[in-house]
Every structure is written in structure tokens, then in C-alpha cells.
Image (tube, rainbow, N blue to C red):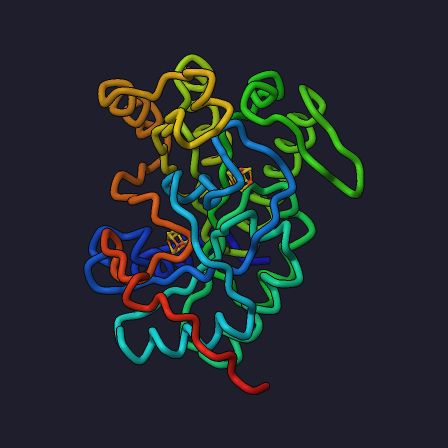
Amino acid sequence: APTREMLDDLVAGKVASHPCYSRSGHHRFARMHLPVAPACNLQCNYCNRKFDCSNESRPGVSSTLLTPEQAVAKVRQVATAIPQLSVVGIAGPGDPLANMHRTFSTLERVREAFPDLKLCLSTNGLMLPDAVDRLVALGVDHVTVTINTLDPDIAAQIYAWLWLEGERYSGREAGEILVARQLEGVRRLTAKGVLVKINSVLIPGINDQALPDVSQLLQASGAFIHNIMPLIARPEHGTVFGLNGQAEPDAAMIAAVRQRCGEIMPQMTHCHQCRADAIGMLGEDRSQQFARIPEPEPS
Ligand code: SF4
Ligand code: SF4
């Protein structure tokens, strides 16, 4: 088994070339997201299914779904136009791992056609334990898991329900299942040297006090960076939080929580909450330039 030092070296190399993870990288490398994953297996109270998964994306935008075949054709189109393209990620518009077939079929096709591109994925983590081996086998180097709390009672305030193996769970029970599976998934990924970033949506009065615990345990579980994203909850987004008038964090709260968590784990502060079909350098979105859905490539 690799030692901790070997894993640390591996991680440093992987950080440097990913636009989302390294400050220097984000001016030199471009990324694109492939919106191939429509379904989700749970319901976050900050999400409206009409829009992209808010675990990684800014709420209120929706991406046009691509088939795996169209997605590969699109990678080819973008790689030709943007030579700095280095990372291809799947981040929605639902949860990538609630769409195992579509997600893995896309990753496999991209891996085969573009062996040099880095693959990345973001997920709510519910199905992560079932996906670790396949992700590692495909060389998916970067995985983002949204973990908003480790406390099942707090989870019950954030998630309305989840589906697992044909059963529907809610409340504290759903929270216990989700947290246990998120942690198991993260630990198994980091044990294999996969770079794991943790996203947390900061929800005032619900998890603002609990996020340092998330940093603490996830740091100990081998995750390498924590990205605290302010809740965006407007009534017009039609989310439970938006309709209930749940407060969004102000700049002072965001700074204070990042400061506390930053004493435990490196913080990501240049995240742009990009959409599930974002294309370009970080902070830039050229998805409109590539809006035409390409013809699938003959297989
Ligand atoms: Fe990966 Fe997220 Fe960056 Fe997209 S924005 S490339 S999913 S880390
Ligand atoms: Fe929405 Fe993403 Fe949460 Fe699923 S995991 S409910 S798509 S924010």
C-alpha cells in the first residue's frame, strides 16, 4: 500500500494542473463540464430540480442535457478551439452518480478518445462507495463531494429525503445513511490517492457552527481542500429554502466560517460555482459559444 508521503506527493502533482484547485493553474488551464446526468437520488432543500445541481453550480441556471455520444463530440469541438483544455468534469445537472450508466459511459468514452485529459466529477456522495473502484480504474483524479454536515439531525434540516436501493428515507435516518456513505466514499478515494475536495453550502442558523467539524474530520480522512459556498436562496429559484425565506450568509459570516475552517484545512476561495455545462478558464464561461449540440460521433 502507498505510504502517506507517497500519497502527498501524488496529490501535489495533481493539484498543480487542475484549474479549480491551484491558484496558479486557474489562469493556465481550462475546464469543461459535460451535462449528461439528469437524475438525482436525494432532495436538498437548496435545490430546485428545474435547474442545475447546486452542489457545484450557481442556482437558477439550467444546462441542456447531452447524451454520452454528444458529450464526447463536444469535448472534441472544445479541445480544438481551446487548446488549454485540461479537465473534463461531470457535475450535473443532477447527481452524476445517480446516473451511473450515463456518467460512466461518458467517462469511458472521453478517457478512450482523450487519454491526456484529466477527468473529474462532483457528487452528493450518496452512491460514492459503489463508484470508487470504477472511478479509480478510469483514472478519475479529482472528485468533489458536497458534505454540509456530519450531524444527522442537521442533515434532516438540509435534505428532504433520499432514495437508496429502492427505499425512500427521510429525517434523521436519511442523514445517518448519507453521512456514513459520504465518509466511506471519501476515505476509500483518498486511500487510493484520488484528490478529494469537499464542498459545503453555508446555511446560516443551520450548519454555520458545524462546518469546522466537517473540516476536521474530512481533513483527517484525507480530503485536501474545503470549499465553503454561500447558500443562494431566492424565492424565484423555487427551492424550499428560497420559499421559506431562509437567510443567505452575509460576507462577514462567510469570512468568519472560512477563517475558522481555514485553521484546519486549506480553503478554496476562488470557486465560481460554475454551471453544469461551463466551458473555459475558471471564471470564464464560453458555454454559449459552444451551445450548438454536436452530432454524435459514429462509434
Ligand atoms: Fe471539477 Fe468542479 Fe472544477 Fe468542474 S468546477 S472541473 S467539476 S472541480
Ligand atoms: Fe439538487 Fe444536486 Fe442536491 Fe440533487 S444533489 S437535490 S441535484 S443540489
Q: Nearer the viewer, residue 52 or 153?
A: 52
Does 111 appear above or below 213? below
What is the quadrant of residue 185 in the picture?
Answer: top right
Q: Farthest residue in the bottom direction?
A: 298
In the rendered view, would you say 134 is above or below 61? Answer: below
Where is residue 162 drawn, in percent x and y? 67, 34
- 294 relative to 22, above or below: below
Residue at (35% x, 27% y) in the render:
261
The x and y percentages for residue 233 are 39, 26
The residue located at (32%, 21%) in the rendering is 249
Quarter of the image for residue 187 reads: top right
> Seen in the image, is 81 located left or right of residue 117?
left
Residue at the spot 32% in from the left edge and 52% down from the top edge: 20
Q: How many labels, in total? A: 0
Q: From the image, which quarter does the C terminus lie in?
A: bottom right
Residue 17 visible, this angle: no
Q: Position of residue 289 (x, y in %)?
A: 28, 67
Q: Is residue 25 left or right of residue 236?
A: left
Residue at the limit of the structure toward the top, as seen here = 205
Work out whether residue 53 can be spotted: yes
Left or right: 281, with 97 as reference point? left
Q: Position of residue 10 (x, y in %)?
A: 42, 59
Q: Nearer the viewer, residue 31 or 291?
A: 291
Specify the farthest residue to the front.
Answer: 236
Q: Residue at x 63, y 55 (%)?
A: 99
Closest to the observer: 175 or 162?
Answer: 162
Q: Which quadrant is home to the N terminus?
A: bottom right
